[in-house]
Image (tube, coloured by chain):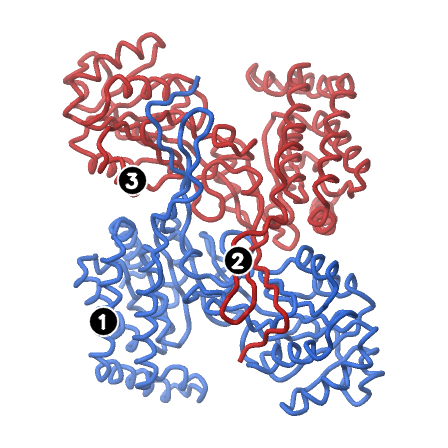
Chain colours: A blue, B red
């Protein structure tokens, strides 16, 4: 198979299908989603049969246990995949929403209408449920999709694609609206990200290496986040009981997630009081602490943090701690080391809460709340396709709206420019 | 001078200045703008003296008359540059605007705050007034700017830069907030568009060749439009007197602008009646007509339109005309040939007006109004830095808001994830 030709064909088909999808009404899209969920439940045995082929090939290739676990489609995962699609069907349809309609002095009536982006390319690694999740969000937001999953999940993804295609057919939508790339050739990714004539935006989901490579080589915009180096700053005016809970929850609620805290900044005025209390709390979860020099004068038994620590996303029960002179030093540290994901200040001081909100340049900035709230479900987006740390287009958790654009609409009754 | 090192230094300085600019309050930014306008008026003689050096060099290099005209800083142009800056000072400050603040079930209060993009690189050709216009918009929207003007205007641009720097100084802002590249080496552009660590977005203003080159090579997002191939579709249910005015105004109000109509689509049901009337109107302005076969059965004396005509932005008194069977054929033509800038339908039919608004995928879609309204001033944006035909981020006329982003803000009172 000529990969170049094959990807061009997928692109052309997607571009063509995107017009039908853009004008599909809400009921049609919801019908498709509901049928896809039904088909996934009905074909659970078939999905598991195909998944078994992937698992066997994975074992033969010597994939590690964690990867094999992520690859497996258990009964519970199949049910949760179907439920996820049904939840997307229930979400409000953003397409066609008209906002800010006003009359201009010329007499034209001007507003903005929400429209799909067009064609979205999704590139992801081994978890096959992403196929269903991402397809559902793109479909509901009126976009055609080309999905490129990991080669380890090729049979599982093709089986899920069949369920998706039955849903599209049943709703009278073109099956080319959602296409799963059928080749494991890596060149397919290179093609997918360099077809601006057919693909409007790329959403990569996976490791930092994959995302960096895609961002570097893509010829179309990429909605991405690279890492989550999130900070909690305990201000001198913090309620220390609250600070303890937020610092504990931001680190320990889950470790392997992008909105977990990696570095704790503590104002020197309260460091001697709060740090020993926190050390006890973290000990209950065996969190390893690494501190700056001042931290270690208070907690002498912990390791020294190196320069590298401030720039590391641990995704593990490890926390770096730094004592700072004031909010300016805290914000300077964040400016230098944050990945622009999420930062929290704990304070009861009005002026400093406002400064932190205004001056910290991250996709989510919080006062007196755990960094773990930076999440599409917690923000009420219903579902998220990812969390963007870019400033252009979508920023922070990206839900249906992040997969849309707005065009200007003008209604007149014969106006011409004088 | 080592260009690479020089551009890196500009980038570092801009990135640093962007923090001061992001937290500058409205009064400070307005003071800077007002003083810049004052300085431009006060130094008119000096500006013209430096401009004369550019003009002389241009003449020596044999630049054509049109280019020399665009380069010249007349009294009127200097006054209009100062007025433009004052108008930006009067615009509402978008930065810090908080929207959609709501409580989530967890108890956190969630909203979005408008923030600057950071550092904007502007690349433009010979008109020196762009230096002042673009700098003013970026300053008001809290962004640091690196401006790279055409080499023909280097002395004029440096003189304008001096006025800008006095304004920044007087307002207590770093002069590195607005930097004009001091070298005419073309390598500076290559550097400017490939420093994602220092520059957040590039706005190119100039010919299609320049913009295509920049888009291809840039490593950061580009806010751009390549061309404006705008369409007017006269539907079978059009008010023909209105259609005549809109088709005439869309073409003839100005020729060399991106929102002028280049192709007229006419429903076959009204073609025989409206086309001869339009031919008479266009004759008064000596507009050359080029038609499809059906058009030429009605207007036999006009030239045949070639395939190339449908994809050409004339920017001249030339118009291509095509007769179509219905709205679907009109929208198919637009889908295939439009540059995604602006399209208008003239109709009194309710259903077709809604279809056209919903289904045509351009940055501005209009009913019963001249395409010439697609403009930042007409849309009430106050001023525009350009018109974007991209779907990501800003779309259509880009004013202050298009130079900003939004971050999520969360206010809590101790919430943690359960």
Residue farthest top in this picture: B284
| Residue annotated with mark 3 | B335
B2 to the left or right of A158: right
Q: CA distance from mark 2 to mark 3?
A: 30 Å
- Label 1 is found on which chain of the structure? A
Secondary element at tag 3: helix
Q: CA distance from mark 3 to mark 1?
A: 31 Å
Residue B49 in which image quadrant: top right
Q: Counting other residues with Cα less than 10 Å from the Cα at mark 1, is it few (<14), some (14-19), or many (20 or more)? A: many
Residue A97 in the image: state x and y as whole percent: 37, 48
Secondary element at tag 1: helix
| Residue annotated with mark 2 | A395
Relative to A267, residue A146 above or below: above
Residue B418 in the image: state x and y as whole percent: 53, 80
Residue A107 in the image: state x and y as whole percent: 41, 26
Secondary element at tag 2: loop
Q: Nearer the viewer, mark 1 or mark 2?
A: 2
Residue B136 in the image: state x and y as whole percent: 66, 34
Mark carried by residue A27: none
| Residue annotated with mark 1 | A163
Q: Are marks 2 and 3 in contact (CB under 8 Å)?
A: no
- Label 2 is found on which chain of the structure? A
Q: CA distance from mark 1 to mark 2?
A: 32 Å
Front in this rendered view, residue B78 or A212: B78
Q: Counting other residues with Cα less than 10 Å from the Cα at mark 2, is it few (<14), some (14-19), or many (20 or more)? A: many
Q: Nearer the viewer, mark 2 or mark 3?
A: 2
Same subunit under labels 3 and 1? no
B104 to the left or right of B12: left
- Label 3 is found on which chain of the structure? B
């Amino acid at each position: 198979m000529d990969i170049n030709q094959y990807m061009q064909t997928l692109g052309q088909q997607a571009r063509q299908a995107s017009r039908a999808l853009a004008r599909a009404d809400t009921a049609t899209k919801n019908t498709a989603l509901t049928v896809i969920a039904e088909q996934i439940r009905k074909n659970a045995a078939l999905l598991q049969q195909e998944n078994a082929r992937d698992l066997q090939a994975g074992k033969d290739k010597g994939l590690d246990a964690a990867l094999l676990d992520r690859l497996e489609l258990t009964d519970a995962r199949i049910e949760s995949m179907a439920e996820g699609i049904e939840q997307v069907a229930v979400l409000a349809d953003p397409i066609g929403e008209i906002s800010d309609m006003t009359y201009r002095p010329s007499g034209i009536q001007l507003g903005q209408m929400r429209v799909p982006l067009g064609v979205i390319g999704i590139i992801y690694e081994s978890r096959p449920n992403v196929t269903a999740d991402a397809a559902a969000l793109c479909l509901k937001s009126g976009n055609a999709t080309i999905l490129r999953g990991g080669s380890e999940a090729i049979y599982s993804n093709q089986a899920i694609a069949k369920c998706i295609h039955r849903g599209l057919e049943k709703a009278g939508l073109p099956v080319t609206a959602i296409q799963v790339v059928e080749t494991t050739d890596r060149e397919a990714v290179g093609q997918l990200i360099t077809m601006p004539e057919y693909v409007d935006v790329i959403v990569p989901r996976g490791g930092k290496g994959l995302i960096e490579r895609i961002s570097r080589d893509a010829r179309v915009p990429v909605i991405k986040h690279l890492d989550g180096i999130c900070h909690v700053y305990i201000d001198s005016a913090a309620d220390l009981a609250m600070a303890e809970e937020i610092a504990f929850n931001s680190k320990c609620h889950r470790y392997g997630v992008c909105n977990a805290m990696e570095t704790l900044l503590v104002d020197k005025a309260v460091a001697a009081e709060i740090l020993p209390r926190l050390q006890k709390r973290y000990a209950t979860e065996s969190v390893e602490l690494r501190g700056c020099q001042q931290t270690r004068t208070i907690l002498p038994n912990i390791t020294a943090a190196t320069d590298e620590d401030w720039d590391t996303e641990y995704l593990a029960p490890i926390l770096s701690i730094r004592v700072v002179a004031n909010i300016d030093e805290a914000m300077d540290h964040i400016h230098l080391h944050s990945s622009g994901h999420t930062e929290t200040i704990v304070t009861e001081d009005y002026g400093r809460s406002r400064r932190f909100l205004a001056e910290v340049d991250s996709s989510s900035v919080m006062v007196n709340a755990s960094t773990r709230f930076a999440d599409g479900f917690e923000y009420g987006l219903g579902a998220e396709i990812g969390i963007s740390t870019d400033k252009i287009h979508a920023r922070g958790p990206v839900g249906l709206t992040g997969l849309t654009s707005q065009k200007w609409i003008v209604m007149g009754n014969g106006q011409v420019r004088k």
